[in-house]
Amino acid sequence: RDRPIARARTRQLAEIVNSGIQPMQNLAVLEQVALIAPAADKKAWCAHFVGRGLDALEALAQESSGRYLVGNDVTLADVCLVPQLYGARRFGVALDRYPRLTEVEGRLAQIEAFEQAHADRQPDAVGHQ
């Protein structure tokens, strides 16, 4: 695989999460939504924007993925993917629409660093022992 193209695709996929999805589910944004539209369903708001971003991520991953989102090496795109899918589940997004993303997530879950970094394993996680 052409390294400059792979690096550019890595940044593209990471930025879909970083600047396209994550800000729309940020607590400060949700507080502003509640001020502007008090009756708004914040969970539905998040699910909408998370779904739009994951649609784009899935389509691009179909073109660039191997074992991971960009080829066969773990990249920043994979690091961004895992917590975003965790958040998607929290907002009730149906992940069956994203077979490539969840397939990659399953592979990443087998890597010790990803296992240790999982949100449920962090000291501030609800129910953390």
Image (spheres, rainbow, N blue to C red):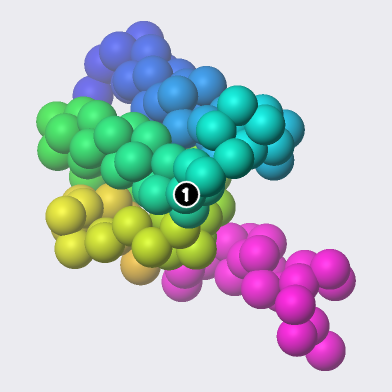
Residue at figure coordinates x 21%, y 53% from the top left:
98
Quarter of the image for the C terminus: give it.
bottom right
Residue 79's image quarter? top right
Residue 93's image quarter? bottom left
Region in magenta: 108-129
Mark 1 neighbour class, 10 Å CA radius: few under 14, some 14 to 19, many 20 or more: few
| Residue 40 falls left or right of residue 27 | left
125 inside magenta stretch? yes
Which residue is under mark 1?
41
Residue at figure coordinates x 16%, y 55% from the top left:
97
Depth order, front residue of 16/39: 39
Quarter of the image for the N terminus: give it.
top left
Depth order, front residue of 6/85: 85
Q: Does the rendering let one see residue 125? A: yes
Give the x, y percent position of residue 33.
59, 32
Give the x, y percent position of residue 36.
60, 26
Identified by mark 1, the residue type is Asp
Residue 65's image quarter? top left
In the rendered view, tell whether residue 15 sits above or below residue 110: above
Depth order, front residue of 128/9: 128
Residue at figure coordinates x 49%, y 43% from the top left:
40
Q: Does the rendering let one see residue 112? A: no
Give the x, y percent position of residue 89.
43, 63
Helix, strand or loop at label 1? It is: loop
Give the x, y percent position of residue 59.
16, 34
| Residue 7 falls left or right of residue 101 | right
In the rendered view, tell whether residue 94 sits above or below residue 62: below
| Residue 23 falls left or right of residue 104 | right
Residue at figure coordinates x 45%, y 58% from the top left:
91
16 inside magenta stretch? no
Specify the farthest residue to the bottom.
129
